[in-house]
Amino acid sequence: MQKICVIGLGYIGLPTAAVFARAGFSVVGVDVNKQVVERLNKGEIIIEEVGLPEVVKEVVDSGRLRASLEPEEADAFIISVPTPIHEDCTANVDYVRSATEAVVPYLKKGDVVIVESTIPPRTMDDVVAPIIEAAGFNPKEDVAIAHCPERVLPGRILIELVENTRIVGGLTPEATTKAANVYRQIVTGDVIETEAVTAEMSKLMENTFRDVNIALANELAKISARLGVDAHKVIELANKHPRVNIHQPGPGVGGHCLAVDPYFIVEKAPEEALMIQLSRDINNSMPDFVIEQIIKLTSELKEPKIALFGLTYKGNIDDVRESPAIEIVEKVLANPRYDVRVHDPHVRDEQVPFPLVSFEEAVKGANLLVVLADHNEFKMIDKNVLLSEMETPVVFDTKNCTNLEQEEGLTVYRIGDVTGLQAIAVKPINS
């Protein structure tokens, strides 16, 4: 196998294309975004991922990777496009459907079609296979059709694409093996073969497991706020049990996986997926919990100046998809009483619909600093800058990540410890 066509050049598709090209394959990456295609053909990228700019430049310069607006004939087609949710929280597989339809004119017998996009159970059987069959192919004999979900952590994608175990599920055992062999040429971890629907469900349950456990931690934070308990101390002590590992609470769950994938299961089995739906409800409630604390803290101030730090769903990346921080910022901005400054060193202006400012601009004269992402830059905030620049040095750390501690002149609250939370006092005019 010599040539691979990757459909979708986003956070997963582009690194996947780059890794295959680095391994010696001829790779064409396809995207509907003309800017992405033009930039990639210059060896440039518009997403942030450790090590990716260097690898992309290397494989583009070598001619092993190029970008196009249209698919081309290849030996294997890898579909890596978004699968968002509709307003009713059902899966939107339109991009997967469109991508499959786009590659059909370039298919030939013996080709491999792999969907990496996270999809609801039976999507390979009920959506992808019928499209290929309608084009005149026998989807169980002429073309090897399989699902191989991505399982990577942003910030480590280039490493985990190679080292992580991959799950490959085909419509037939022969298709499974043929697709698995594509990955065995670049993956050092295990490549496990199974059926398509099992592969689909395994990816969904990986992220659902994490979502449910985060919900337990977030519910603990809300209970602790009611009872006046430090949830972080509770977690620390409970986790000393050898078989207990409670997650940390936060402002909500974001990203294209954890905040979306559980709904794909709920959609297919709503009467059975009760815990999964409840966990989604709990995690979705956390932005409002954060807003409630902001309102309490600023209730005594006429026009509070609030610095909001961090927009991504996790630290040290530029990905704002489904980020609870975005919801929090938009709700705070919607309150005309607040003077809001937003800062995130990893996010570009064009990614968000509101202005961003520097660290210095955000904290100057601020009454409250709210940390919404655990970027490294926020873990080591200089307390002396806050003491000298903020009007009232009060910090609400929703990620429990800063090095700041309560001391004279500096008040620090954390997402799981709002015990004794008091409204910020108005400074006397002559202070």
Image (cartoon, rainbow, N blue to C red):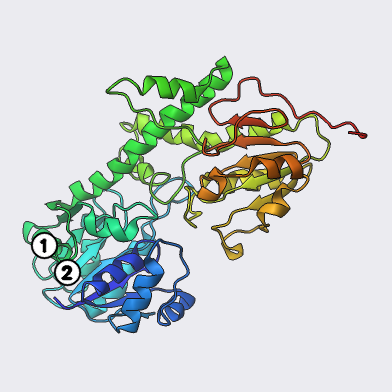
Front residue (pair 46, 179): 46
Location of the C terminus by quadrant is top right
Front residue (pair 153, 207): 153
Q: In the rendered view, does 198 fall on the left or right side of 96?
A: left
- The dot on residue 112 is 2
Q: Tell me where residue 158 appears, x and y as whole percent.
A: 31, 61
In the displayed image of the protein, which residue is found farthest to the front?
384
Q: Quadrant of residue 287?
A: top right
Q: Note whether 175 is above or below 372 in the view shown.
A: below
Circle 2 crowding by C-alpha within 10 Å: few under 14, some 14–19, many from 20: many
Tag 2 secondary structure: strand
Give the number of marks. 2
**C-alpha gap between disc 1 and disc 2:** 8 Å
Front residue (pair 189, 13): 189
Q: Note whether 71 is above or below 182 in the view shown.
A: below
Tag 1 secondary structure: helix
Q: Residue at x 34, y 39 (%)?
A: 208
Q: Tell me where residue 383 appears, x and y as whole percent.
A: 65, 40
Q: Residue at x 70, y 53 (%)?
A: 360
Location of the N terminus by quadrant is bottom left
**Which residue, given by chain and number where applicable, does mark 1 sit on?**
175
Circle 1 crowding by C-alpha within 10 Å: few under 14, some 14–19, many from 20: many
In the displayed image of the protein, which residue is found farthest to the top?
227
Q: In the rendered view, does 211 fall on the left or right side of 395?
A: left
- The dot on residue 147 is none
Specify the amino acid type for callout 1. Answer: Ala
Q: Tell me where residue 153 appears, x and y as whole percent.
A: 35, 51
In this rendering, does residue 366 appear at all?
no
Specify the amino acid type for callout 2. Answer: Val
Q: Tell me where residue 88 appears, x and y as whole percent.
A: 46, 45
Does the CB distance between marks 1 and 2 fall below 8 Å?
Answer: yes
Q: Note whether 244 is above or below 19 in the view shown.
A: above
